Image (spheres, rainbow, N blue to C red):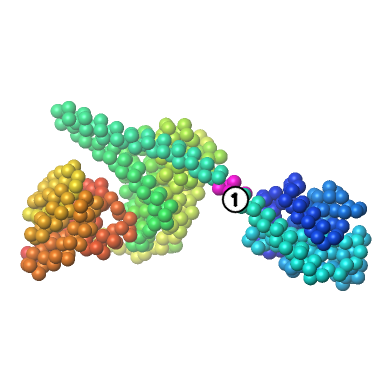
C-alpha cells in the first residue's frame, strides 16, 4: 500500500474500470474539457488523471498538449502516483498549486519527484458521484508561474464539468444494468407465468374432471377415490395461491414471524408423515434424523414458517429423487438448530446454483416441465430463513443429488409436560343459530351444509342489507359475514349492528366472524378493530368451522 487508502479504495478502482475511465479508448467529452482548460489558462499541457492506488499509478484519461508534447503521447500513459503532485491533490481533496517545482519544499524533502519538463503545476480533485476523490484535473507549465485565484476558479469549474461527465457515465451504466435486469426479470416472469398456467390447470383438471366423473359414478368405492382426487387437487391449487401470496408479502416487506414456544421435533415429524406416502409411492426412502434434542424440548420461534420451509425442501427432494433416499436432519444445541435436507436425486447443474433461490427460477426448463413447480418455493424459503435469522445454502453434484442446509437461532426453552386434551369446539354448534351472509350462492350452500353437519340451525342472507335486517332481530349465536358483498360490505354490516346497540333492547348480536380471503396480519387487525370477534380465512374447511365453535362451547358450559 503506497499511502493510506480509504476503506472502499478498491471498490473505487473497480468503479473506474467499470465506467471505462481507465484502460479505455479516448472520449471526446473529456478531450474537449482538457482542451478548454489548456486554452483558458494558457498552458502547454492539461490532463485528466485517474488514480489506481493499489498499483501506485496515475492513468492519463485525456490530455491537451502544445509544443513539445503531443496528445497521443500522453493519453493512456501511466505515471507513478506516490511521488507526484497529483497525490497531494488527492490526499488534500483540494486544489494544489506549485509555482516552481525546483524550489518546492515537497521536492526538496524528496516527497515528490522533480520533472525537468514540468516546472509549474496546478491540480484540482475529481470525484465519483458518491464524493470519492479518484483523480485530478491538472495543468502544467515549463517555467515558474504564480497561479492566480482566477486560474484556480476556472480550473475548478472545468473539474465540475468533468465530475458531471463522470456522473452521466455512471447514470448511463446504471440504466444499462437496470434495463438488462428488467429484461431478465421479464423473461423470468414470462417463464413463470407459463409454468404457473400449467400448474394451475393441472389441479383444475383434477377438480373439474373429478366432478364430472362423480356425477356419473354409482360405485361407492370409485366415488370415494374421486372425492380424494378432488380434495388433493384443491389442496394443490391452494398451495400454489399461497406461494404466490407469500412471495408478494416478502416483496412488500409484510411477512411477519410469530415468536412462541413450539416443539421442533413435532414439526419435523409432521412433515415426515406428510411426505412419507409420496416417497413410498416412488419407491424411495424418506428418513428423519433428530440429533441432540431433549424429550419434549421446546424452542421459541415460528413453528408454522419452519414447517413451511421444511415441507418445501422435503417436497422438492422427493419430487426430484427417483432412486435412493431423502434424509431430513435436525441437529440441536443450546443456541439453535441446524437443518439439512439431502437427497440422491438428479442434482443441480453448477451454473444454476447461483440463481436457485431467485423468484421464478428453476434448475432446468426440461426438468421443470417433467417434474412441475413454479419456481417460487425456494425464493420463499430463502426469505423465511433470512427473516428467522439464518442463511440457506445449497450444494449439489449433478446426477448424485443435492443438499440444502441452514442454521436458525432458536433458543432452547425448558421442556413442558404433554398438553392436556382440549375441546375441539365441534359441539359448540349443537343447537346454535347461525347467520351466514355471502353474495355467492355456492359459498352459502357449502357453509350452511357444513354448519348443519355440526348441528347448527342456519339462516342465509344474500347481501349486506339483508344481513342487517335479519341480525337486527337478535337471537343469533354467531354471524358469519363475507367481507366483500355488494351494497353493504361485511365491515359496514358489523359497524351498523354495533352502532344499533342491540343490548339496550335486550337483544344479543352474537359472535361476529369476518369471512374473507384478505388475511394479511394488518387486514385481520383492521377487521377486529372494526368490531369483529374473529376472522375466518377463505377457502375454509370443516375443521376451520369446528374451531370456531370453541367460543360457543365455552358459553354453553358457562351457562350450564
Q: Residue at x 84, y 50 (%)?
A: 71
Seen at 91% across and 53% down, the residue is 68
Q: Nearer the viewer, residue 340 or 246?
A: 246
Magenta segment range? 173-178
Q: Residue visible at 35% across and 65% down?
A: 414
Q: Is residue 174 rendered magenta in the image?
A: yes
Q: Residue furthest bottom?
A: 105
Res. 262 in view = no
From the viewer's side, name the closer residue of 401 and 151: 151
Circle 1 Cα neighbour tier, 10 Å, few/some/many (<14 / 14–19 / ≥20): few
Query: How far across and how far down the image is residue 28, in percent?
Result: 74, 48
**How far from the left and from the top, in percent, is residue 191?**
45, 37
Where, quadrant-wise, is the N terminus in this rendering? Answer: bottom right
Give x and y (percent) for residue 255: 39, 56
Instruction: Judge whether residue 143 is colored magenta.
Output: no
Residue 158: percent from left, percent from top:
74, 60
Q: Is residue 405 left or right of residue 60?
A: left
Report the residue at 48% width, 46% height from top.
357
Quadrant in the picture for residue 536: bottom left
Residue 511 in sight from this viewpoint? yes
On screen, residue 251 above or below 558:
above
Q: Secondary structure at mark 1?
A: helix
In the foreground, 13 or 66: 66
How many marks overall?
1
Q: Quadrant of the C terminus?
A: bottom left
Which residue matches tag 1?
174
The image quadrant that residue 219 belongs to is top left
Q: Main secondary structure of the magenta part?
A: helix
Compared to 423, does 316 lie above or below?
Answer: above
Amino acid at each position: 500500500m503506497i499511502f493510506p487508502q480509504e476503506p472502499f479504495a478498491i471498490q473505487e478502482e473497480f468503479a473506474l474500470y467499470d465506467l471505462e475511465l481507465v484502460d479505455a479508448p479516448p472520449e471526446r467529452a473529456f478531450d474537449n474539457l482538457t482542451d478548454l482548460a489548456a486554452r483558458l489558462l494558457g498552458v502547454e499541457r492539461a490532463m485528466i488523471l485517474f488514480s489506481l492506488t493499489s498499483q501506485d499509478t496515475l492513468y492519463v484519461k485525456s490530455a491537451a498538449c502544445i509544443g513539445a508534447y503531443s496528445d497521443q503521447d500522453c493519453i493512456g500513459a501511466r505515471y507513478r502516483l506516490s511521488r507526484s503532485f497529483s497525490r497531494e491533490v488527492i490526499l488534500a481533496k483540494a486544489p494544489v498549486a506549485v509555482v516552481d517545482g525546483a524550489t518546492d519544499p515537497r521536492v526538496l524533502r524528496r516527497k515528490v519527484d522533480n520533472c525537468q519538463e514540468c516546472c509549474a503545476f496546478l491540480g484540482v480533485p475529481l470525484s465519483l458521484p458518491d464524493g470519492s476523490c479518484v483523480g485530478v484535473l491538472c495543468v502544467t507549465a515549463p517555467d515558474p508561474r504564480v497561479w492566480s485565484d482566477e486560474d484556480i476558479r476556472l480550473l475548478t469549474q472545468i473539474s465540475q464539468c468533468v465530475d458531471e461527465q463522470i456522473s452521466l457515465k455512471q447514470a448511463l451504466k446504471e440504466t444499462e444494468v437496470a434495463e438488462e435486469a428488467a429484461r431478465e426479470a421479464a423473461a423470468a416472469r414470462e417463464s413463470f407465468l407459463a409454468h404457473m398456467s400449467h400448474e394451475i390447470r393441472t389441479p383444475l383438471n383434477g377438480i373439474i374432471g373429478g366432478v364430472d366423473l362423480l356425477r356419473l359414478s354409482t360405485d361407492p368405492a370409485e366415488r370415494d377415490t374421486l372425492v380424494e382426487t378432488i380434495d388433493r387437487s384443491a389442496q394443490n391449487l391452494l398451495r400454489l395461491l399461497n406461494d404466490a401470496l407469500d412471495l408478494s408479502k416478502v416483496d412488500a416487506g409484510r411477512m411477519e414471524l410469530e415468536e412462541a414456544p413450539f416443539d421442533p421435533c413435532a414439526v419435523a415429524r409432521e412433515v415426515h408423515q406428510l411426505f412419507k406416502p409420496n416417497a413410498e409411492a416412488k419407491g424411495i426412502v424418506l428418513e428423519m434424523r433428530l440429533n441432540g434434542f431433549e424429550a419434549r424440548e421446546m424452542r421459541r420461534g415460528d413453528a408454522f414458517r419452519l414447517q413451511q420451509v421444511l415441507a418445501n425442501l422435503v417436497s422438492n427432494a422427493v419430487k426430484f429423487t427417483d432412486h435412493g433416499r431423502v434424509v431430513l436432519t435436525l441437529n440441536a444445541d443450546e443456541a439453535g438448530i441446524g437443518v439439512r435436507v439431502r437427497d440422491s436425486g438428479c442434482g443441480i447443474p453448477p451454473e444454476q446454483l447461483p440463481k436457485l433461490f431467485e423468484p421464478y427460477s428453476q434448475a432446468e426448463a426440461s426438468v421443470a416441465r417433467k417434474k412441475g413447480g413454479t419456481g417460487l418455493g425456494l425464493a420463499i424459503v430463502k426469505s423465511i430463513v433470512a427473516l428467522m435469522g439464518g442463511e440457506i445454502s445449497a450444494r449439489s453434484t449433478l446426477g448424485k443429488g443435492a443438499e440444502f442446509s441452514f442454521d436458525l437461532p432458536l433458543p432452547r426453552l425448558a421442556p413442558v409436560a404433554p398438553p392436556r386434551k382440549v375441546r375441539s369446539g365441534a359441539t359448540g354448534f349443537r343447537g346454535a343459530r347461525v347467520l351466514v351472509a355471502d353474495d355467492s350462492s355456492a359459498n352459502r350452500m357449502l357453509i350452511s351444509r357444513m354448519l348443519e353437519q355440526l348441528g347448527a340451525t342456519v339462516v342465509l342472507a344474500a347481501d349486506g342489507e339483508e344481513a342487517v335486517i335479519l341480525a337486527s332481530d337478535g337471537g343469533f349465536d354467531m354471524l358469519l359475514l363475507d367481507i366483500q358483498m355488494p351494497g353493504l360490505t361485511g365491515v359496514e354490516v358489523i359497524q351498523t349492528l354495533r352502532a344499533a346497540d342491540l343490548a339496550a333492547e335486550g337483544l344479543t348480536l352474537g359472535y361476529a366472524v369476518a369471512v374473507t380471503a384478505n388475511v394479511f396480519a394488518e387486514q385481520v387487525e383492521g377487521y377486529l378493530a372494526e368490531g369483529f370477534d374473529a376472522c375466518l380465512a377463505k377457502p375454509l374447511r370443516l375443521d376451520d368451522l369446528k374451531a370456531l365453535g370453541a367460543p360457543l362451547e365455552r358459553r354453553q358450559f358457562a351457562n350450564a
